[in-house]
Image (cartoon, rainbow, N blue to C red):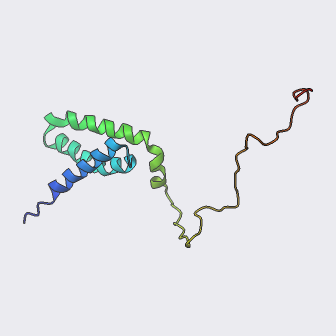
């Protein structure tokens, strides 16, 4: 039975990932989407056709470098025990609003050190 969906799926994934990377949008997601394709390319060439492993290896090195650069985006995915997501009521803020930081404005009066004030 021939379904014929695998190559269009792989090509569509590669096209989507390429566009996302070129546009610099959702880069960590794009890197996650392309990783199984690259692992399959490497496995195919290591086990079945070793002569063509160099281009796949170069792409894998680039992939791993970019994943390392975006490693902070993957930290929440790699937590051993993730906290359950809290459902918000309509209008509720995702974080408590008890602590409000206010930037210091330039026109606010600041205490002056002795000897640095204006002398008339």
Q: Which sits in the foreground, 14 or 74?
A: 14
Q: Seen in the image, is 48 located left or right of residue 88?
A: left
Image height of 2 relative to 65, above or below: below
Q: Residue at x 27, y 37 (%)?
A: 59
Image height of 78 relative to 84, above or below: above
Quadrant housing the N terminus: bottom left
Number of disc labels:
0
Q: Position of residue 40 (x, y in %)?
A: 22, 48
Would you identify the image quadrant in which residue 52 lies? top left
Q: Seen in the image, is 14 located left or right of residue 49?
A: right
Q: Seen in the image, is 113 located left or right of residue 99?
A: right
Q: Residue at x 32, y 36 (%)?
A: 62
Q: Position of residue 66 (x, y in %)?
A: 38, 39
Q: Which sits in the foreground, 3 or 15?
A: 15
Quadrant housing the C terminus: top right
Q: Residue at x 76, y 41 (%)?
A: 107
Q: Which sits in the foreground, 84 or 25?
A: 25
Q: Residue furthest bottom?
A: 89
Q: Residue furthest front?
A: 120
Would you identify the image quadrant in which residue 47 lies? top left
Q: Residue at x 49, y 55 (%)?
A: 79
Image height of 114 relative to 45, above or below: above
Q: Position of residue 95 (x, y in %)?
A: 61, 61
Q: Position of residue 38 (x, y in %)?
A: 25, 45
């Amino acid at each position: 039975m021939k379904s014929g969906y695998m190559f269009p799926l792989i090509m569509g994934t590669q096209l989507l990932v390429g566009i996302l990377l070129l546009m610099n949008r959702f880069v960590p997601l794009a890197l996650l989407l392309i990783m199984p394709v690259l692992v399959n390319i490497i496995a195919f060439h290591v086990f079945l056709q070793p002569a063509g492993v160099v281009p796949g290896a170069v792409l894998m090195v680039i992939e791993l470098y970019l994943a390392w650069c975006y490693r902070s985006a993957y930290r929440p995915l790699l937590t051993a025990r993730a906290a359950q997501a809290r459902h918000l009521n309509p209008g509720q803020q995702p974080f408590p609003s008890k602590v409000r930081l206010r930037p210091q404005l330039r026109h606010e009066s600041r205490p002056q050190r002795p000897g640095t004030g204006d002398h008339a």
